[in-house]
Amino acid sequence: MEGSFGRVIEVSTGLCRVALDGYTVLCAIRGTLSAGDTGHTNVVAVGDEVVVSLDASGQGAVEAVAPRRTALVRRDVFKAHLQQVIVANVDQLLIVSSWREPPLWLELLDRYLIAAQRNNLLPIICLNKTDLAESRDACHAALQPYVEMGHRVLLTSAMRREGIDELRQVLRDHSTVLAGLSGVGKSSLLRAVQPGLQVRTGEVNRRRQEGRHTTSQVTLLVLAMGGSVVDTPGIREFGLSGLRRQDLVQFYPDILAVAGDCRFADCSHTHEPGCGVRKAVRRKALSKARYHSYRQIYDSLAE
């Protein structure tokens, strides 16, 4: 198909902004493109590689979307049988949490870790606002189970500029999506990494063809040092579409390590007698917080 090849950097209802060779263009999304056949609620996502046609006035239209190499997806909030593509074609997921304001929420952290593993993304954990912790040891202790599982963990304070050099190393020359609750400091961290980084542009106004400042838009930004970041809005609900209860434990290697002590091979580790996992929690051989996260996610999944 003839046309220009570009990458979507922003999406709004019926429109998207595409980076072409040295400039960006506002594009309509063709009605002939259908998301329904893919099992997704959105046909175009930030990060998508697309074919764009331009008319005589320079207005663009997305004619085709290339197959996605990777994607961060969640269960659609309103259509549970479908998935929402948050971002496509990135290679890293930086899961940003904060020690306080809002407090560290391990269940959401685990949901992002599971999503990363299911979608071929490298997960990296970033605990921000460590300046609000009683001690740095407390931060290390809270995330020690993840370190033991082999995950990379960054401790940062955007306010004190602590951990920013290591964060730059992580982001350099990679395509990274940042995800986490609203208020954890994703935008502050990005401004610390690259002072003067542009404010995220929000929903595209159809009539004026310009953006408005907002914190509810997914936006791709190119870093001067190399690489790109996708800043996402704070998401409180991250449903794991297509994951069954009996498969959840495969994403908890620390639980799997003690599951062999269960009396029953098909133990769900929730209520059965002789459960080796619950015994491990009682004798403090398994993190109580990790087990609680497992139970919360287990109860949210379909049987």
Image: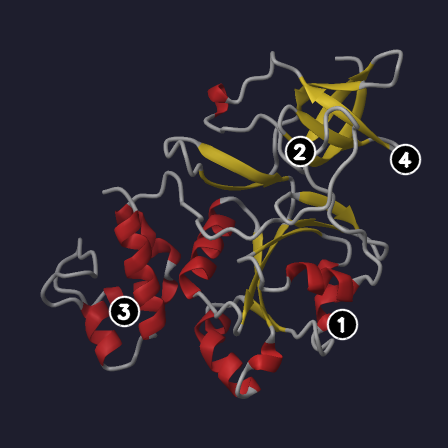
Amino acid at the residue labelled 2: Val
Q: Are marks 1 and 4 in contact (CB under 8 Å)?
A: no
- Badge 1 local density, few (<14 within 10 Å), some, or many (20+)? few
Q: Viewer-nearest of labels 3 and 1? A: 1
Q: Of label 2 and label 4, which has the lower sequence position? A: 2
Tell me how far mark 4 sits from mark 3, CA to CA.
Answer: 54 Å
Q: Which residue is mark 4?
A: 22
Residue 140 tag number: none
Amino acid at the residue labelled 3: Val
Tell me how far mark 3 sits from mark 2, CA to CA.
Answer: 45 Å
Amino acid at the residue labelled 1: Asp
Q: Of label 1 and label 4, which has the lower sequence position? A: 4
Q: Is residue 296 left or right of residue 267?
A: right
- Badge 4 local density, few (<14 within 10 Å), some, or many (20+)? few
For residue 87, what is the image quadrant?
A: top right
What percent of the width, then of the height, locates residue 263?
12, 64
Q: Viewer-nearest of labels 2 and 1? A: 2
Amino acid at the residue labelled 4: Gly
Judging depth in this view, the residue of 283 and 128 nearest the camera is: 128
Residue 165 tag number: 1
Residue at position x 54%, y 36% from top?
85
Q: Are marks 2 and 1 in contact (CB under 8 Å)?
A: no
In the depicted structure, whether residue 83 falls above or below residue 61: below
Q: Is residue 163 in view? A: yes
Q: Of label 4 and label 3, which has the lower sequence position? A: 4
For residue 90, what is the image quadrant?
A: top right
Residue 11 tag number: 2
Q: Which residue is mark 3?
A: 258
Residue at position x 81%, y 51% from top?
198
